Image (tube, helix red, strand yellow):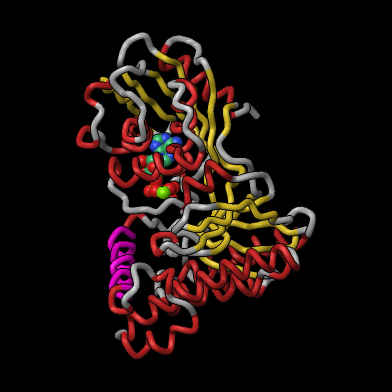
Amino acid sequence: MTDIRDEVRAGFAETFGYEPSGLWSAPGRVNLIGEHTDYNEGFVLPFAINRRTILALGLRSDRMLRIASSFADELVELDLSELDTDNLHGWSAYPLGVAWALGEHGADLAAVPGFDIFIDSDVPVGAGLSSSAAIESAVALALNDVWHLGLDRRTLARVGQLAENKAVGAPTGIMDQSASLLGETDSAVFLDCRTLESEVVDLGFAAAGLELLIIDTGVSHSHATGGYADRRASCELGAKLLGVTSLREVTVDDLPRAREVLDEVTFRRVRHIVTENERVLDTVRTLREKGPRAIGDLLDASHRSMRDDFEISVPELDLAVETATMNGALGARMTGGGFGGAAIALVPTDAVSRLQVAIDGAFAEHGFGQPDTFVVSAAKGASRD
Ligand code: ADP
Ligand code: MG
């Protein structure tokens, strides 16, 4: 099998007619627990996965930006002097948006040289594994190096988020970029989305004989924009009616009062966020005190909360989770923003293939399209390769 690094080098040479000066890469991520808590200033626990977006870069002597990807059949060109959010469209808004966002974080875009970039990736796009953060983080790290910006990884995460918010126009939080930039092998990134403080937490899956199985339902979450915005609005409304700046400030003890103040739907949205924050903290504590075999119930409870209170699951995700828990998984939940995408299951190594067969069978029985199931491991964050 050819290494993806050789392919990206060859892709660069074929597209631009010379050899690149370096390769950078950044991983996708999966969120172990803590869903929709990021924009409520709460807690999340994602980890970087062993699927990466790799880019080859060559600096230019002029001010042109040229960018190509194995993902798209076009070469996008833009002069640095025209780099503005209004001029960025489609897939190239992610990488070129990062170049723009670096300007917002102190890079002197009037002085830096142009570049050629070729991108390749084995992060599935649109599966909830954040191919978007992978591409942003790889570009951010590469440009930070070649433009000698000296920004730290936390700042680069904010650069990626700014690109996604302003150049792409997706109102996403800081979780994905943080995982992609701060992740470490066999560890998760425990992130406080209010202070942006983060800690690396040992997962110990391999030592405990566990695998993390991704079940990509293939149900596209690209129509989720409306649902995502709607859930955000509910959370903002709940916070306003409860007199707090964010739901981070609401605890489980406040829920009886919240039930009196809020309408039934808003209450359930709030209850998901409040209990999910608690579950993230419990998961971190459990990992440290008892190890990964003990976190299964927390994953299960997270799924029920998203299904019943936040109402962002779909039948395919519920089936994946149910089939996993009935066939040897210690715990399972949908992951990502919802309305499609993937579920995760924590599975003893010797039960993985049996579970995959069971899931395929259950999906066929329900007349659902065949899901893509694969194991991921917790990998290191963005790197120069
Ligand atoms: P997710 O992050 O869950 O995979 P998003 O919708 O947030 O899904 O981001 C996917 C988009 O990011 C793609 O539609 C494309 O525009 C861009 N993208 C991701 N990976 C690449 C890549 N390797 N090359 C070009 N564009 C990419
Ligand atoms: Mg994304």
* Count of marks, rendered view: 0
Figure check: 114 above or below 213: above
Highlighted magenta segment, given as a residue range: 224-239
Residue 94 percent across, percent down from the top left: 36, 37
Answer with left or right where residue 378 lies relative to residue 255. Answer: right
At a point 64% along the width and 48% down the height, the residue shown is 378
In the rendered image, residue 383 lying in the magenta stretch gets the answer: no
Give the quarter of the figure containing the C terminus. Answer: top right
Answer with left or right where residue 115 lies relative to residue 177. Answer: left
Residue 242 percent across, percent down from the top left: 33, 79
Predominant secondary structure, magenta span: helix
Taking depth in this image into account, of 288 and 95 the one nearest to the observer is 288
Residue 177 percent across, percent down from the top left: 47, 45
Give the quarter of the figure containing the N terminus. Answer: top right
Q: Quadrant of residue 380?
A: top right
At a point 57% along the width and 56% down the height, the residue shown is 190
Residue 334 percent across, percent down from the top left: 51, 65
Taking depth in this image into account, of 249 and 201 the one nearest to the observer is 249
Taking depth in this image into account, of 59 and 349 the one nearest to the observer is 59
At a point 66% along the width and 49% down the height, the residue shown is 377
Answer with left or right where residue 298 lies relative to residue 367. Answer: right
Q: Is residue 373 visible?
A: yes
Figure check: 13 above or below 103: above
In the rendered image, residue 226 lying in the magenta stretch gets the answer: yes
Figure check: 259 above or below 144: below
